[in-house]
Amino acid sequence: MKARRFLGVLLVLSAPAAWFALASAGNGPLIQGARDALPAQERKPSLAEIGPRPEPVPAPEPASIDNALRKGVEFLVGNQNKNGSWGSPAYKHGVEIYAPIPGGHQAFQTAVTAMSISALIETGGDREDVRKAIERGELWLMDSLPKLRRATPDALYNIWSHIYGIQAFARMHQRVPDPERRKKLAELIHAQIGFLMRYESVDKGWGYYDFRVGAQRPATDSTSFMTAAALVALREAKDIGIDVPEKLVTGAVDSIHRQRKPDYSYLYGEYLKYVPQHPINLPGGSLGRSQACNLALRLWKDDTVSDKIMKTWLDRLFARNGWLDMGRKKPIPHESHFAVAGYFFYFGHYYAGLSIAQLPPEDRPFYQDHLAALLLRLQSKDGSWWDYPLYNYHQQYGTAFALMTLKCCRHS
C-alpha cells in the first residue's frame, strides 16, 4: 500500500481539470525569428533573460572547500559495500516508494555505484584507500551494469543506471591510459547507449515510468530532466571518441524543445503539456530542471541557450533557492511548494555546476561562490549530503552529486 501511495502522488501531476483554465494564460508562442530580426536597440529582453539577481556572497576559503571534499570522499570510501557497490535496499526512513523487487533496487544500486565511482575519480586524489575503492567499484559496475534491465513494464529506473553508467565508464576510460582497458570500456559505453536506444520512448526522450501500455518499446511520456541527463552523458561519451547516433540525440533534443516554455522553464514531463501553468512547471518548480535542460541543449549546439539565459537561470537558482530547499529532506515527493520533490536539490545543483563551466571565465566566480557557500553549509557531520530519503541510497547519491558539484566551485 505504501508503494502504491507513491504512485498516487505522482499521478497528481498528470492533468487535473482545475489547471485547464490556466493553460492558456500567458503562454502564447514566442516567435523567435521575428524577435531576433529586430535591431538590438529595439529588441526587448525575452522572458528567459529577466529574473531576480542574488546579492554577492563572500568567497569561501579554498581550504574549506578542500576539507569538505576530503570529508565527503571519506564518507563514500567508508560506506562502500564489501562487494564494491554502494547503497542497499535497507529501509532507513522516509516512505517506501514504488520499487519492484529485485529490478527496481538493482537499478538504484547500480546508478548510485556509478555516481560514487565518478565522484571518487573526480575528487578523491591519489590516496591509496580511494584508489582501492575505485577499483573495487569498477569491477562490480563492469560486471553488473551490462546485466541490468527494466524492473517491470511500468518501472524504468534502469535508465538512470545507463545514464550515470555511461558517465562513470567515460571517467574510467580516461583514468588509466591502457589501450586494452579503454577498448573494453568503449564497448561497455556502446552497450549502454544501445540500452538507451532500446528504452527510448516512442515519442523520443526518456521517462522512468510507462503507465500507458507497458509495451516492449516504452510508450512513456518523456521527462525533461531525465532526457537532459541522458544528453549530458551522451555528450561526455562523444567527447572521448564514442560514436553517438545522431538520430538518438535529435529525438531527445526535440523532446526537450517541446517541453520548453518561453521563459525557459521546462515541463516536468510531456504529459503536462496541456497544463503549462501547473505549479511544477512554473519557474519555482523548474529550478531543479532548467539548469540540466539548458546545459544539455547548449552541449548539443542549441544556439538559443545564450550566456545571458544561462546566467539568468543561475541567478534564479540562488535568488530563489528557498523553493528548492523547502522540498529538501521531505519524505513524500512533490509535497512542497511548486510541487518540488526533494530529489531535485542536488541533481539541480550538480547541473548548475556544470553550467557555470559553460560561461566566460570572468563570469564564473560569482556563481561558484554561491554554489560553494550553499554546499558547505549543508554538509552533515559525517561528511555526507542528502536531499531525499530513499531506502539506503540517498546519502550515497547526494554525496556523489555534491562532491562533483563542489569540484566545479574552485576558481581556476
Image (cartoon, rainbow, N blue to C red):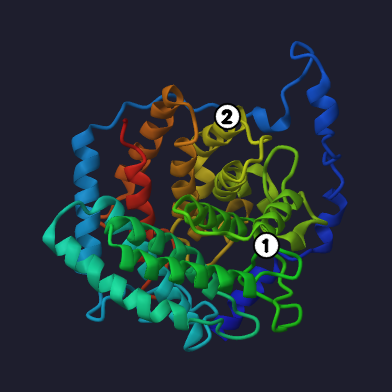
As drawn, which residue projects farthest toward the front? Answer: 179
Quadrant in the picture for residue 302:
top right
Inspect the image, locate mark 2, and give the three-letter code of the amino acid beneath it.
Asp
Q: Which residue is mark 1?
A: 205
How far apart, in angstroms, are the residues tagged by discs 1 and 2? Answer: 25 Å
Inspect the image, locate mark 1, and give the three-letter code of the amino acid beneath it.
Gly
Label at residue 307:
2
Identify the secondary structure beneath mark 2: helix
Q: Position of residue 7 (x, y in %)?
A: 63, 76
Q: Is residue 261 left or right of residue 1?
A: right
Q: Name which residue lies at 71% across and 37% down.
A: 263
Q: Is residue 408 left or right of residue 124?
A: right
Q: Quadrant of the C terminus?
A: top left
Q: Is residue 122 left or right of residue 215?
A: left
Total marks placed? 2
Q: Quadrant of the N terminus?
A: bottom right
Q: Name which residue lies at 28% across and 62% down.
A: 178
Answer whether labels 1 and 2 touch (C-beta < 8 Å): no
Query: Looking at the image, can residue 385 be seen?
Result: no
Q: Is residue 399 left or right of residue 70?
A: right
- Image vertical order of residue 257 relative to residue 158, above or below: above
Label at residue 166:
none
Query: Looking at the image, can residue 410 be seen?
Result: yes
Q: Position of residue 87 (x, y in %)?
A: 34, 74
Q: Earlier in the sequence, mark 1 or mark 2?
A: 1
As drawn, which residue projects farthest toward the top? Answer: 41
Quadrant in the picture for residue 307:
top right
Identify the secondary structure beneath mark 1: loop
Q: Position of residue 342 (x, y in %)?
A: 49, 59
Nearer to us in this view, 115 or 303: 303
Mark 2 Cα shell of 10 Å, populated few (<14), some (14-19), many (≥20): some
As drawn, which residue projects farthest toward the left? Answer: 128
